[in-house]
Image (cartoon, grey):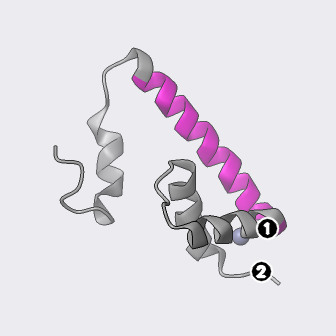
Amino acid sequence: MHERSGNFEDLIERYCMGQIVDDGEVAAVEEHLLCCEACQKLFHQTNLFVSTFREARRWGPPKPPILSRGNRHHKGRGGQ
Ligand SMILES: [Zn+2]
């Protein structure tokens, strides 16, 4: 009934940040969101966080600490 949500937590985070470019992955996330309440909550939380972060960036200088969070996945990316 419920697939391993640990797998989806990461996908949902990337989905909210617009980092998923694979159509199959997008479809999998959206499909899972429709039937998983826990991931719906995560999705809304992450969405809120991402939009707050984007608003903050619009008015203030970018804050490097938030970027270091993704380093475990994207070594050598970002060019900073
Ligand atoms: Zn789930």
Ligand 1 image position (quadrant): bottom right
Q: Which residue is mark 2?
A: 2
Q: Which mark is residue 36?
A: 1
Magenta stretch bounds: 35-57
Q: Nearer the viewer, residue 18 or 10?
A: 18
Identify the residue shown where x is 36% and y is 18%. 60
Q: Vertically, is 74 above or below 7?
A: above
Q: Secondary structure at mark 1?
A: loop
Residue 62 picture location, percent across and down: 31, 28
Instruction: Tell me the amino acid under the disc marked 2.
Output: His
Q: N-terminal of the two: label 2 or label 1?
A: 2
Q: Main secondary structure of the magenta part?
A: helix
Kind of residue at disc 1: Cys
The crowding category of the residue bearing disc 1, from other C-alpha atoms within 10 Å (few below 14, some 14 to 19, many at least 20), is some
What residue appears at the point 35 percent right and 53 percent down from the top-left corner? 69
In which image quadrant can residue 12 be found? bottom right
* Marks 2/1: CA–CA distance: 7 Å
Task: Check the picture and name the quadrant holding the C terminus.
Answer: top left
Q: Mark 2 CB in 8 Å range of ligand 1?
A: yes
Residue furthest top in the image:
59
Mark 2 in CB contact with mark 1 (< 8 angstroms): yes
Q: Position of residue 50 (x, y in %)?
A: 53, 39
- Which element type, helix, strand or loop, lies under badge 2? loop
